[in-house]
Amino acid sequence: MQFADEPVRVQSLSQSGLPRVPPEYIQPPQNRPVRDNPPDHDLSIPVINLFGFDPNQRDSTRETIARACREWGAFHVTNHGVPTTLLDAVRRVGRTFFNECPMSEKLRYACTAGSAASEGYGSKMLVSSEQQQRNDAVVEVLDWRDYFDHHTLPLSRRNPNRWPDFPSDYRETVVRYSDEMKVLAQKLLALISESLGLRASCIEDAVGDFYQNITISYYPPCPQPDLTLGLQSHSDMGAITLLIQDDVGGLQVLKSGDGADTWVTVHPLSDAVLVLLSDQTEIITNGKYRSCEHRAITNPDRARLSVATFHDPAKAVRISPASELIDESSPVKYRDVVYGDYVSSWYTKGPGGKRNIDALLLES
C-alpha cells in the first residue's frame, strides 16, 4: 500500500471525456462486476421500521434486527428519528461541493499526503494490495471515487474550519448530522446488544467513546463501468456504519447462502438509513453477527453520492468477544485485538473483502 503525493482526481478524469479508464483503475477479472446476471435473485436488504423507538414495539424490533444481523449484517431502518430534511441537507451540501466548487478551491482541503485516512478532500485513500502485472510493470488498482473525510467525534477532533464553507451551510449541516448519527448509532447498538440477550450497553461499553468519521463519497460517471469499482470489496473496521445514498444507487452487499455468494444491489430509500455491521461488532458478538462485506459499482451516465458515518473504538481499546456469549457450546472464535493494531494491519494489507477479520479467527 502507498499514497501518492498528489493523486489525480477521478472527477477531473471523468470530465475530460476520456473514452477508456486508465489502466490503474481496471480491476482484475475476478473482481469486476457482472452486469448480465439476473437482478439479485429477488434478494433485497431488510427494511426495519423502528417506530420511533416506541417501547411497545421493542420486542418485535429486536427480533427483526437479530434476523437481519445473522443473515445479512446490514439492514435499512425507517422511522429512526433523524429528520428527513437533515438527510436531504447533507446530501445537498455534499453534491454542491463536488459539482459546483472549483477544483482550485477543493484542493485547498486536500488530504495530507502519506497519512492513512487523513481528513480532507482526496481520491486515493487506499489502493488494493492485489497488484496486477502488465507489460512487466506492477499496476496498483485504484477506486473510481473522490471523497471528503471529516473527523467529527470526539469533539477534540472536530474542527469545522478544516471543512468546506461552500455552500455556506456546509459546516453547520455536517455538525448537526454528526450529532444525530451518534445518537442513532447508540440506540441501534443497544437494540443489537439486547437482541443477543445482552445488556443494552454491552457493545457500546466494549467500544468506548466513539471515534466518528463522516465520509462523503462522489462517484463520477465512468466510461467503462464493467471494468472498474467505485469502492473495492471490504468490510468496515470499526463497530457500526450508518450510510445514506442518493437516488442513483450502486452500493452492493455480499449475501452468503446455499453454498454461494451473491452481490445484491442496495436500492436507495431516501428516508432510510442503511446500517452496516463492522468488524469489531463481529468480534464482540463472537461471530453470531457478521460484519457486512460491501462494494460500490460505477455508472456510465450519472454521478453518485453517498454519505457514510463510521463509529469506531479509540486506537488503544482492546476488543474481545463478550464473555456472556462464551460457553462450552460456543467457544471463543476470535483472538483479542487492540483496535489501533487492527487499523494498522488493515491499511498495510489493504481491504481484500473480510480477510482482515478472518485473520483473527482461532483454530476450531
Image: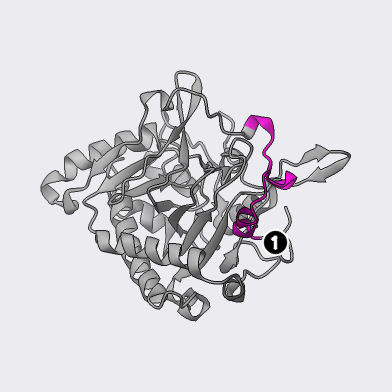
In which quadrant of the rendered image does the C terminus lie? top right
> Residue 34: x and y, percent?
55, 29
Instruction: Identify whether 301 is placed above or below 152.
Output: above
Residue extending farthest to the right is 136
Q: Residue at x 17, y 45 (%)?
A: 58
Q: Give the total number of marks visible in the rendering.
A: 1
Mark 1, other Cα within 10 Å: few <14 / some 14–19 / many ≥20: few
The residue located at (35%, 66%) in the rendering is 177
Between residue 363 and residue 6, name the one nearer to us.
Answer: 6
Examine the rendering and report whether any part of residue 251 can be seen: yes
Q: Position of residue 105 (x, y in %)?
A: 57, 75
Q: Residue at x 61, y 74 (%)?
A: 104
Q: Which residues are magenta?
A: 9-30
Instruction: Indicate the secondary structure of the residue bearing disc 1.
Output: loop
Left or right of 89, for residue 98 = right
Residue indicated by mark 1: 7
Please tell me whether residue 205 belongs to the stretch shown in magenta.
no
Within the image, what quadrant is residue 197 found in? top left
Query: From the viewer's perspective, is 133 left or right of 42?
Result: right
Please provide percent x and percent y for residue 240: 42, 51
Question: Which amino acid is tagged 1?
Answer: Pro
Give the colouring mode of the picture: one colour
- Residue 211 visible, this orientation: no
Q: In the image shown, does 91 or 1 lie closer to the viewer? A: 91
Question: Is residue 171 placed above or below 15 in the rendered structure?
Answer: below
Q: Position of residue 290 (x, y in %)?
A: 44, 38
